[in-house]
Amino acid sequence: MNWQFLLTSIFGLSIFFVVIVTVLFYLQHRIARKHRRNENPLSHPTDGKYFRRFLPLELAARYDEQIQNFIALKRPHFTWNDYKWHILVIVGAIAIVGRFAVIHRYDYIRAIDITESELQAFSRAHYPLQNSSTEQLPDAAGVLKSVAAKTLILLQSSNSKMAQLAMSQWRIWASKNRISTRICKLASWKQCGPASSSLYVVLPGLWDTQKLDDLSAGAASVILYGSPLEVTAPTSWEWQDLKFESTKRSSRPYLIIAGDSLLTLGFDAGTIIAAEPFANDYRVISSAGDAYAINSDRSFSGTIETRLKALTLGESRFTWLDFSPNLQDHPTVIDETKFNALWAAVFRYLLRQPYSAIASWPGGAKFGGLIAYNVDANADRSSLVVDLLENTKIPITWFLTSDLAQKDKVLRNLDDVGELACVSDNKTPLTQDPINQQLRRLARCQKVVLQLNSYLPKGIHPPEEQYNSETLDALINIGYSYIFARNENDRLVPVIQKSEDKSKQLVFLNRSTSDDFQLMTVSGLSRSEAERRAQEEIKWLKMTGGLYSYSFSSNNLDIHHLQIVKTIAKELIKEKAFFQTAKDISSWWSYRSSLILGLPTEASLLEKYGPKKLVVDEKGKLTEGTP
Amino acid sequence: MQNPRLNFWNRIGHFRLKKGHLLLCVSGYWFIYCYYAGTLPDEIVSSYIIPALFTIWLLSMIREIFFFAGALVDKRERTKRIFRSQNEARSLPKVSIIVPAYNEEDSIADSFHSILMLNYPNLQVIFVDDGSVDRTIAVVTEVANQFPQVDTTILVKPNGGKASALNFGLSYAHGEFVLCVDSDSRLDPDALLFAVQRFEDPEVGAVGGFVSIASLKNMLLRFQQLEYQLGLNFPRRWMSLFGSVTVVPGPVGLFRRSALQRVGGYLVDKNNFAEDAELTLRLLADGWKIHSDEDMIAYTEGPETLDALLRQRYRWVRGMYQAVQAQHRALSELGSFRGKSISLYLLFESTALPIFNMGLMIFFLSRFFHSGVADVIAIYLLYMVAIDLCRILIATHREGEKLSWLFFAVLEKPLYSFLLQTWAMLSLLDEWRQEEMTWDKLERSGQLKSEAAP
């Protein structure tokens, strides 16, 4: 028995009782007034102006008849009409108390808690975690050596300032990397040397599509740099899958990498590189790029602008890009390693070097998707989610607090509803607590969910998304495997952090897209608008190959809100996302990391996810395996 | 009041929206919303509710601090007065005591006796029989004959109510000061001796006494005594320092006769439900200072049943509110800081505090029923009990009261205090809905007769 709650209830209900009694007295008072409404206060012999006086017995006989009438006035006959408000108040009070008793019926049971011995059994080991990259970046130095064997031919088609600037950038780069260069006219590219030993850079200018088509037919390796001058005209300029449009200065100066594409295979999807565009007066639209334009704060909305695109045309390979090859032309925040690797990836592709990588997502999925449900205030509305799952089988991850899990009938009996994971014991941020308390809170949540629902939570969505190194230590020591939060991850896919000795790890599932609070409360969108915004974000995530995550809470949950969840789920299925629970996604990511690093993996995962070995020849033709 | 002959639809047709209805709707909506949502939206709570509640709480806290300070300062003043009374040979001014009565043959002997036995040499006692039909006159005459040394006048008039009886008696008074008492009040022998010294300041128009419950035979009466002692008498000490006492209690009040005559005496109006508060505010609005004196004690009967108590409080709340509404503008137009302060204080006491209490109650209960936590109620209760304990300790220190009151203070808050707070709000709602009001009179049981007061 939870004595504390019992005493609280008695205390609170006694005050409520006092209030209700007062209200009943008030109603009684109104009835009394009503029945004496027209009575003259001085009409009764025992009534003074201000008091009704004690009447001596010897005088009573004189007033017997009047007193009888007075009593009759004071005690009117019972009528339902007089007492309708009494009945309403009493029924209302009983209903309120009854509802209270029903809602809190589990509060009277002693709460499941971690015993001191259980707490002491947990290790308090400290694990300084480091990012364990799952990227398979190209060897920049090795690729550059191969580039040095080629002649860099800069193809001019105009003498504009833009063209001159571009030429100087490339000459500086070539000089720095000791690569021989030649300058030619685009119209006479064939006379500049054999295509097999040349690497062409088409500088900004008057790009003649006929000449570009010639290049594509000539087994050439071509970089289209910047934009054609025609783009300044009101009409757009199109060639192949590239559409150049005139625009105002771009508000999205950074570049975000699309995963699993021709150029960026091996890069983590959604990696942001602060490579600023060569010019800002145009934008490029294509059906699929290898990198896109984005703000540093990642706002996934608006037109998707391509910043990098590979084109395989006949025997030729083209790469269109818009950023200088020199590091010094970019902001100082740029990651040098990734920048160099990106250029290496460009040259690797152009030079037709073989390369491979484990795909970001299994089963041919282009991107990942997860839907998380946070049980917060109004936990009783969780029954709506349960009903939804009975009909749709959407893979939802439930993030529960153990306090709520014990109090709600629905949450005590979650069966076959997807994954159950933890927030903590309540919504108070963990970071305010020392490690012992954090251990207790996190372990308690795990224990409660396991005892009530026979499901061992492996993931955590920390309260207020706040955590510190002690939280991470506590999670590892208890046995959690992933953390779902809006963290400072610089990419759109999960990140694995490992201890120094590689024996312990945590998967960080980054929450990069809008949740219900941002859509409905902050942005104040209607249902249809919220659905559109979510679909827009899904499109972005699909283009970049990252992990789309939608998190919604019981706080404002209603059937309209559930409709948004259904729409998102449909969209993820339609777009063939790797749409799973958070645990499955973290499990996949962990498995993928093991494959990349050549570590032993679980047989069940190998059976579930593969991989399948596919081999292609130099021409890109499949020679082994079936996709 | 609604006419019972009107059917439902006619009632709707006759319905007129008043501010009481609006407040009722807002309160109901607030409770239902919080009941389901747990609390109001964060923006509303942080922008409006918390600042408003905090401001009112802060004001009440400042008020408490002043009350404590007032109580401690007042003790020094009292010591000085007692010292003067004992050491200075002075001729004390004449005091006319007006005792209105109506059918009081059962209890008048004791109370009249206590008046004639007052430890004061220069008295004129005026007994006004307000058309009694029992032996009141005979009993009074018999008692008066036992005290031939006291200048006693017995007047008889047709029944017209307490105010009219007091005004009638006032026209026969020739003392410099007039003591108005209830016919069932029993006065302390030293009630006048120290109180008249308060009139040394010519600006003082009245001095209110301290009322005490005569018989403490049940818990309800004990709670009332605690309330009189801590809730009514205690603040008066502070107000008295500035001559700003807002109610000279009906059972015992000493007035400067010229002041009473200047403001026209008591208001004779059947719709006046708090004639003592009304007169006090009129005196304040006329610029007089009003003090209170803790040695001017009257023992009176308290309502013995909950029903009687609530009816009494209904009159008090609505009567006080009406008096404040009638006088607060005149007070604020006095031009003095004191007048404005009193006006604001009265508005705070009669309007803001009941709304504050109701808001808190709604917040507490909705939060409790939604989340099952009673922390805020408990903290608020502890806060109120702590204030009461401080008051009791000061009262104990000042007057040698028993510490056993501490026990009642702990019980009083969750039971009696919440009940009266809720009742005050319901009464105010009636006032704001302009419900018709009648005298639901207190039924006296003759406590003073059966149990002799000290």
Image (tube, rainbow, N blue to C red):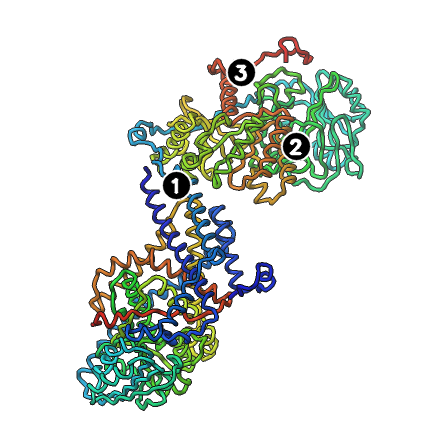
Mark 1 to mark 3 CA distance (whole Å): 41 Å
Gap between marks 2 and 3 measured at Cα: 41 Å
A560 is higher (above) or lower (below) than B306: above
Instruction: Find out whether the residues at labels 2 and 1 contact each other: C-beta distance under 8 Å.
Output: no
Position of residue B230 relative to residue A342, above or below, is below
Q: Which residue is mark 2?
A: A323
Q: Nearer the viewer, mark 2 or mark 1?
A: 1
Can residue A178 be seen in this snapshot? no
Is B375 above or below relative to B422?
A: above
Residue type at mark 3 is Lys
As shown in the figure, which amino acid type bears the numbered disc 1? Gln
> Mark 2 is on which residue type?
Phe
What mark, if any, has residue B33 been given in the picture? none
Q: Quadrant of the C terminus of chain B?
A: bottom left
Identify the residue at image location x=30%, y=89%: B175
Q: Which residue is mark 1?
A: A432
Q: Nearer the viewer, mark 1 or mark 3?
A: 3
The x, y position of residue A493, in whole percent, is 55, 28
Q: Which mark is residue A608?
A: 3
Residue B345 vs residue A612: left or right?
Answer: left
Q: Is residue B13 left or right of residue B166?
A: right
Q: Sequence-wise, which precedes: disc 1 or disc 3?
A: 1
Could you tell me residue A100's position as x and y percent?
42, 44
